[in-house]
Image (cartoon, coloured by chain):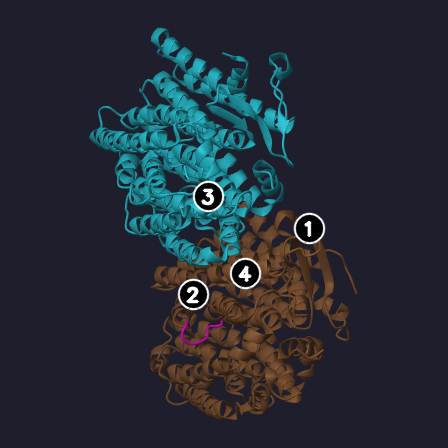
Amino acid sequence: MNSPGLLSFLVFLPLVGSGILLFSQKENARLHRVIAAIFSGLPFVVSLWMMSQFNSGVSGMQFVEKLPWISSFHIEYHLGIDGLSFPLLLLTTLLSFISIIASFSIDKRTKEYFFWFLLLETGMVGLFVALDFFLFYVFWEITLVPMYFLIGIWGGPKKEYAAIKFFLFTLFGSVFMLLAMLALYFASGTGLPGSERTFDLIRLAELASKGQLHLAGVSAMMVFLGLYLAFAIKIPAFPFHTWLPLAHVEAPTPVSVILAGVLLKMGIYGILRISYPILPEATRQFLPVLIVIATINIVYGAFCAMAQKDMKRMVAYSSVNHMGYCLLGMAAVMGNPNAAHAGLSGAILQMITHGLITGSLFLIVGVIYDRAHTRDIDAFGGLATKIPLFAGVMIIQAMASLGLPGLAGFVSEFLCFLGAFGGNFNGHHFSLFAGISVIGILVTAAFFLKMIKLVLLGEFNPKWEGKMPDLTIREMVTLFPLVALTIVLGVYPSLVLNLMDDAVGNIIRFVSGQF
Amino acid sequence: MDLKPLILLSPELFLSFLGLLLLVWEAFFPKTRRAFVIVSVMGLLAAVLYLAQMYISRALPWAGAFGVLPNPGTTGWIQYGVVLGMESVDSLSVFFKIVILLSVILVLCLSLDYHEFADAPMGTYASLLLFGTVGMMLLVGSVDFLMAVISLELVSIPSFILTGFMVHRGSSNEGAIKFFLVGTFSTALLLFGLSYYYGYFGSTGIEPLLQGIGNNGKPDLVFSLILIFILAGLGFKLAMVPFHMWAPDAYEGAPTPVTAFLSVAPKAAGIGFLLRILINHVDLNLTPVLAVLSALTMTVGNIGALHQTNVKRLMAYSSIAQVGYILAALTAAVVAVGDLGSQAVMVYTFLYVFMNLGVFAVLILVSNQTRSDEITTFAGLSKTSFGLAMALAVFLLSLTGIPPMAGFVGKFALFAALMKNTGLVWLGVVAVVNSVISLYYYFRIVREVFFCEPQEPARPLVFSPALICCVVATLAVTLALGVFPGPFLNWVRTVVGI
């Protein structure tokens, strides 16, 4: 199925919206909200429609667009989606739309706010559909700038520090990606006719699988590490996670939703799209390190979350823990084929479910914060009787996050563990690390249950008498779809798993070198 | 003596004549302040068009009548001829001449409404800039060191005077004196090196250097020493580390349009000349020296900029760092002729001119109202003028090298050149770490603009058509060449003759 220009339409629609916003009246906040809702809603509708057009039986790219862009470096404007990027594309358009709705409560400098937000959406959507490394890099960097402003202008008390720390950290990673990208470019050919160099990710993967990428041993490992640095900072994988709690706590609620829901996925996506297929040998050598990092992320992230008093920080650290599950599933890629398939599917599904669940948890914390202006976990109690709708939503999402069967989080985490238990590298089994990682699940359960207990159950703190109305219509509009999807994916995960079957198979074949 | 080839230098001759005319004109009609600037801009535009025409049609207007015919070499590279054995007119010099002319045009537009120039003798100012321009144009085409020294002085002396142009302001005088002392010292250094050069080769032409060999067919110690002296002499002019100490004081003291001028045009000219003499010198073992100097230059520049509170000083350090990047590209160009290195040098220099002048255009617009060059002058700009704030953000992002701004294309070309030569990968790593550092201080300005509140009840900015034109023009180039750099990159490739 091909609809020419459809992906470009998706990518640049938000950009058009932000352009229109620039020329709108400064004071008319209602107008800004309407424009933002339209230009983030339309991509969502279009991407939903694409779901009916997307052929999950086809291996390879769909909706491909290819145009020459910068001829002297053989750079092309190359877009396309497959089973790996399509679910993430859906997640991005959904969460962007929901975050824009959630942003309606913002009334300070709305024009700029929605301008940056729509620009951010262009960057995120573009990143997931770009198939040229140069284009990928451009979109990667485009997401940084709006995020800086969104945190720095509309954030909490330490917003400026959080904003520049976020920008410096991610830029530090991405410049190494730039060098690695150029190294791949020069390794892809001699530059003579017949052996043109390329930035095309598909072509690079093909060259690598045929052994025609002039990159081996130490230099391949250096390139891999350059890429890994960029992706690991974004994920964030231990020890590059320190920017995350700060950025999350300081960012306004809708921005936290995007940050956790989409931006963290860019790192995992980058590894799966670029590092795995293009540098299979280095990937294989790196797997033992990856499994250790995954374990640290899971256990350390969970314990850090447990120690937090601030609920937003707690959810932020739970993201570190949940991204660990992704890494755990991904590390299984060299195990027996079934385990590898389960692990990778779990990792991709975990990205989606984490986006839905943690996104909504940030919204939930935002709901409390809007009313009480504190996120201190000890400040509340007994809210369940006062605001039952809110309590219901919070319980469902917390349970989903700790991995209760029947909800989305369970399926993906289970698949990741299934993969990790079957994963091995040169005969060394990963089951020990998978076993250690189970501690993470326990701790996660502990702190989410603690949160439910302290906030929803127990004595009602009379301080909040009359100040705690239940969910407003706007909050319901933002939360209910996410809750519904959490339940649907928990019961019927094949909805997403079917989409990505072939893509997962492709990645495994690339990494293991078996064709 | 055959004077016919002088036709090749008609833009330079025309501009020198225009400069003299302005001086005479001002003596009789000193009140026509704006006319001086406007006439100079027209003259410079005419020169740009002439050179562009020369490039596009690959021939000189009326050249046949003078018996000067171009000699098209391999794809795109054009050699028109050498004037009196001193000046080569070829696509390389034409490229840099166009860059210089465009930057001087922008600087003149910046000067038109600058608050300190309210009652300055603008005729003198414009003619000094024109003489400096002629000097720079001659420098990039020099194929003889004597010519190079003379044209360097023709740039330097107007630069000293322009730096001290605010005669009643102490800091302006201070900057000029420092600049003058260091400038003459560097010329002496250069001349000292050249005296050895003459003794070594028996000629002041650059051909022996281009052939890259000494008397016995191999570079020896004396020859290396000569090159170091030449490099040091030119390094002062470029504010290359360790010869950069004059730059912050001179930049801070000079009137802002002159600071803008110093930060782009003479650097472009110096880089153009260095590219001409150093290209393809792989056998001279010059690469390690240049590589280390460029790494030092960008690092010292960036670290120096971190804690500056004066925008002009900050931009001085920033321009030191930017020259460091260009030198890194030059290092790559030294390793391999006609390759990505020289392309990167030209791409970066060209784009740097526009993004840097964009920052200065916004600075002048704002400081015309606030009368301050401190970084807080920008506080709350996004509230008083959102468009200007966005433009400034674009320029600073571009200087940092964030896509899709033009600066990224320059950085990309630079990193490509470095990554292609495996021996220079370390320099690439130094350069990328430096771009991350530079983000911090460029974004201190962005922080003021977007995060801080305006200091006093915000007054609207003084509207100035010339300055707005500058902002729009530089913004257009920064965005257009960032998103669609293809044709531009192809043009540069034809200049170096790839």
Q: Which residues are magenta?
A: A235-240
Circle 4: element type: helix
Q: Given the image, on which type of amino acid does mark 3 rest?
A: His
Front of the two marks 2 and 1: 1
* Residue B248 sits above or below residue A192 on the image: above
Q: Quadrant of the N terminus of chain A?
A: bottom right
Classified by dominant secondary structure, the portion drawn in magenta counts as: loop
Q: Chain of mark 4?
A: A
| Residue A68: mark in rendering | 1
Q: How many C-alpha atoms fall within 10 Å of the one at disc 4: few (<14), some, or many (≥20)?
A: many
- Residue at position x 51%, y 58% from top? A141
| Residue B390: mark in rendering | none
| Residue A183: mark in rendering | 4
Q: Quadrant of residue A326?
A: bottom right
Residue at numbered disc 3:
B281
Q: CA distance from mark 4 to mark 3?
A: 24 Å
Same chain for labels 4 and 2? Say yes or no: yes
- Rendered hue of chain B is cyan
Q: Chain of mark 1?
A: A
User: Is residue B340 shown left or right of residue A209?
Assistant: left
Circle 1: element type: strand
Residue at numbered disc 2:
A251
Front of the two marks 4 and 3: 3
Residue reaching furthest front? B216
Q: Chain of mark 2?
A: A
Front of the two marks 1 and 4: 4
* Residue B284 sits above or below residue A323 on the image: above
